[in-house]
Image (cartoon, helix red, strand yellow):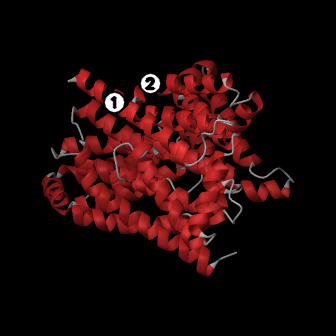
Amino acid sequence: MHRNIEHLKIIAFADILIIVTILSVYFGFLKPENPVMGITFILFFTMLASVVIFWQHRIPILLLTIGIMFFLNIMSIDAFIKYAKFNVIAFLIGMMIVVAFLEEKGFFEVVLSLFLSKFGKNAKMFFVGLLLLSALSAAIVDEVTSILFMTTMVLKVTKKYNVSPVPYILSVVFATNVGSTFTVVGNPVGVMIAFEGNLSFIDFLKWSLPTGLLVLMITIGILLTYYRKEIRDLDRRMRMDHITTKKLRKASDFYKKFLVHREMWAPLGVFLLTIFGLMLHHPLEELLHLQPNSLLLGVPIFAAAISLIQWRGNSIEVIEKRIEWPTLVFFIFFFASVGALAYTNITGKIGEAIVQVTGGDMAKSIIVFIWLSGLLSAVMDNVLAVATLASVVSTLPTETFPLWWAILFGSCYMGNLTIIGSSANVIAVGKVQKERDLTITFWQWLKPGVIVAITQTFIAMLLTILLHVFLFPN
């Protein structure tokens, strides 16, 4: 069986290589007198397909691709440094250290226990609170950290009441991907868009949060209806457990006392410093005459330094073990490979083709980018999709401000369509498999995923057009 799967993967790779080569000729990239653009096109999209098909070997594939690009003079050292987006990487390193510090000090356990004390009285309240907390925590501490804690809580509660965790896991992921659009720190997609589009934390609160909140409310309504039988079953089991309410009330009193305990002061201070620092980075930059988004990078780095000092342990060991280095290495080389498209002007050509299709009309451009980013995210992860499309948006001769929101919404909301659409999806499915030996299949995910993802994206598309074309065109 395993050999058959590997054989099918190799056949799929060969088919994609042939298709990409034909497309490079069709679009006029592969010319005998100047084959560099065509070779770059073939290399990049073959690499992209290889990463999706042979995901466990993604880093060697990227390293090989970049190495070939250097040998063929497609990539220069200056271009590699320029396009590797080390500002995004540094931001992620800072936030990873801060989040690891909060985890180590038990900050998130306190928050989750307080949540259970307030929302654990009946199933409907628990379900709605679960989705609200999932979205909020993703917006504050990033979707990866959020989904780890929310999945843990779902598994504990569903095991206690002996119900299937699948409906609640899927619902939590759907809400997490929505919440990740609320702020710039929600996921790497938002960080990339902020740096590429020169957008501030306040811009996200003004232009992304309102749309995200409406989408979240509609998503909660859809899921309450879709999983009404499962929620009723959980509610019946929760009401039978008469001791739960007393336990939760005691837990609430305990954690309220624990929250004001001296051990919580440091993590709470770091948390508030990071959140308010990011919220106020734009006015502070103007006040201090700093380069735009310099404090968007500076705040998490400073907060990471405070975290390491407060940790009172071996900071080198923390950096080695608590930072997701494989993920960051993957991002560095993938961003650089995307930069090769810009370096050889392929993104410029793609941008010109999109402008020809839309005629420069903003409403049509929003529709194209929101669904293009969404469909790409559904089949190859939203980080890869946005990294590719961001380089295209940057080359457009037209107004691009609304398009950054289009690719943000498309990538995050259509990321709910499939298991591989977002990092949160993959992590949640893996955790359920590991801790409960329960496999969530592609089709189990797809049925509610289609309803949720398409509804979310369609609403976001209408709101983005309304805001940026009719209400606030400038």
Q: Judging from the image, what secondary structure is the residue with disc 1 in?
A: helix
Residue placed most toward the observer, 328 or 473: 473
Residue 348 percent across, percent down from the top left:
67, 51
Q: Is residue 375 left or right of residue 280?
A: left
- Quarter of the view holding residue 221: bottom left
Q: Residue at x 27, y 51 (%)?
A: 446
Residue under numbered circle 1: 11
- The residue sitting at 86% across, 53% down in the picture is 288
Q: State whether residue 134 appears in this view.
A: no
Question: Which residue is at the front of the view, 362 or 344?
Answer: 344
* Rendered residue at 87%/54% (across/down): 289
Say whether marks 1 and 2 touch (CB < 8 Å). Answer: no
Label 2 amino acid? His
Placement of 351 over or under 430, stated as above or below: below
Q: Secondary structure at mark 2?
A: helix
Left or right: residue 439 compared with residue 340 = left
Residue corresponding to mark 2: 57
Q: How many marks?
A: 2
